Image (cartoon, rainbow, N blue to C red):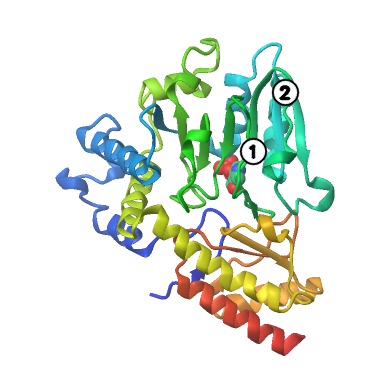
Amino acid sequence: MSRIFNFNAGPAALPLEVLEEVQAELLDFADTGMSILEISHRSPAFEKVLEETKQDIAELLHLPEDYGIFFMAGGGSLQFSCVPYNFLTEGKTAAYADTGSFSDKAFQEAEKVGRAVKVFSSKAEGYDRVPRPEEVVLPENCAYLHITGNNTIEGTEYFAYPETNGVPLIADMSSEILSRPFPVEKFSLIYSGVQKNIGPAGAVLVIARRDFVAGRDKKLPVMMNYETMLEKDSLYNTPPVFAIYIVGKVAKWLKKQGGLEAMEAVNRKKAALLYGMLDRYPAFYKGRAEKDSRSIMNVTFNLPTKELEAQFAEEGKRRGLGGLKGHRSVGGIRASIYNAMPLEGCEALAKFMEEFYQANK
Ligand SMILES: *Cc1c(COP(=O)(O)O)cnc(C)c1O
C-alpha cells in the first residue's frame, strides 16, 4: 500500500486511523452482524452513533446549551437556498459579504427568494481578502448577515468576525469547521458540507441556535425546514448514515489529538511552512491572498507562467504530493491542508517548493 500526501480541496484527505477503523468494522458493525451501510437509521446502533457524534462535536466546540446540532443532505449548495427560504422574510433585506465564488452563489440563491444586497465585495480584486469587521455596514431591517468563513477556492479566511449588533450572523463554514476554536455564540446558524474537513461527501453539519430556527414558516419545503430537521433530530427521513458515521469517527479522532486548540496549533504551523515559501520567493510563488486574510486551510498561489504551474503540479504528483492543481475557475496552485493533512505533508511540500524554485527560477 502506498498512500500519497493528498492536497485535494474536497472531498479531501481523511485521517488514516479513521479509514482503518472503518475498514476493520465494515463487515460487522457493533456486533450487529451487519455493516453500518446495511442497518436501519432508526436502529439503536445508529442512534448511538448519531448521539455520540453530536455530543463530541458539541464538546469540541464548547457549544452553548441553547444550540442544536443536526445533519442534512444536499451539500453546501442546498444550504445557499435553505438560508433565505427560512430567514429572508417579507420586508427584510439579507446582507451578504462577497468574498469568493461560493459567497456569490449563496447570494444569487438569496436574490431568488427576496431582497438581498452585497455589503462587501472583493470580487474586483480577485477575491484577495475578507472584510475587516468595521467595513461591514448592514442595511435597515436586515434579516441576517451571511459570511463564508473560509473561501476554499480563493484561499482566504476570517480570523475576526463582523459585529452585527443583534442582526443574526450566519456562516458557511464548509471548509474550516473544527479546524480551530471560534466564538460560536456570535453565530445564529452555521452550516458545513462535511467533505472538506471532517468527513466524506453526502452530509452537511448544521449548528443552530434553537430559538433562531423555531417558529418559522411551516409552508417551506419540508426538506429545507431547519426547525423540522432540528426537532426530528436529523431523522425526519433517512439521513446520510455513512457520512455521519465517519464524521463521528473524525470527531473522536479530533478529541484524541487534543481538541480544537491543539488542531489550531498544528494547522497554523502547517500553513506557516507554506506561506514561508511564498514570502521567501514572492516573485516566483505569488500568493493570491492578502496576508491578513491568508487561509490556514487552502494555500493558493501562482507561478510565473501557466506552463510552470502545470509542471509544478505534475512533478509534485510524481513525488507523492497529490491534488495541487488550483480550482478550474481560477487556475494556479492550491494546497488544501485540512485537519487530516499531517505536518510531514507540509514539510514535504515546502521542501519540494524550495527545490522547484532552485531548478526553475
Ligand atoms: C465546497 C463548498 C461548498 C459547496 O459544497 P457542495 O457540498 O459541493 O455543495 C460551499 N461552500 C464552501 C465554503 C465550500 O468549500
Mark 2 — residue? 112
**Which quadrant is home to the N terminus?**
bottom left
Residue type beneath disc 2: Lys
Q: Quadrant of residue 245?
A: top left
* Residue in view at x 55 percent, y 54 percent: 10
Any part of residue 21 in sight: yes
Dot 1 or dot 2: first in sequence order is 2
Is there a contact, CB below 8 Å, between mark 1 and mark 2? no
> Is 109 above or below relative to 306?
above
Q: Secondary structure at mark 1?
A: loop
Residue type beneath disc 1: Pro
> Is 169 above or below relative to 85?
below
* Residue in view at x 27 percent, y 40 percent: 52
Q: Quadrant of ligand 1?
A: top right
Mark 1 — residue? 162
Q: Which mark is residue 75?
A: none
In the image shown, does 23 or 198 lie closer to the viewer? Answer: 198
Q: Quadrant of residue 93?
A: top right
Q: Nearer the viewer, mark 1 or mark 2?
A: 1
User: How many neighbours does mark 1 have within 10 angstroms: few (below 14), some (14-19), or many (20 or more)?
Assistant: some
> Is 311 above or below relative to 58?
below
In the image shown, does 88 or 165 lie closer to the viewer? Answer: 165
Q: How far apart are the two marked residues, 1 and 2, measured between alpha carbons?
A: 25 Å
**Which quadrant is home to the C terminus?**
bottom right
> Is 244 above or below relative to 223?
below
The image position of residue 69, as x and y in percent, is 40, 33
- The answer to whether residue 14 is left or right of residue 51 is right
The image position of residue 155, as x and y in percent, is 66, 56
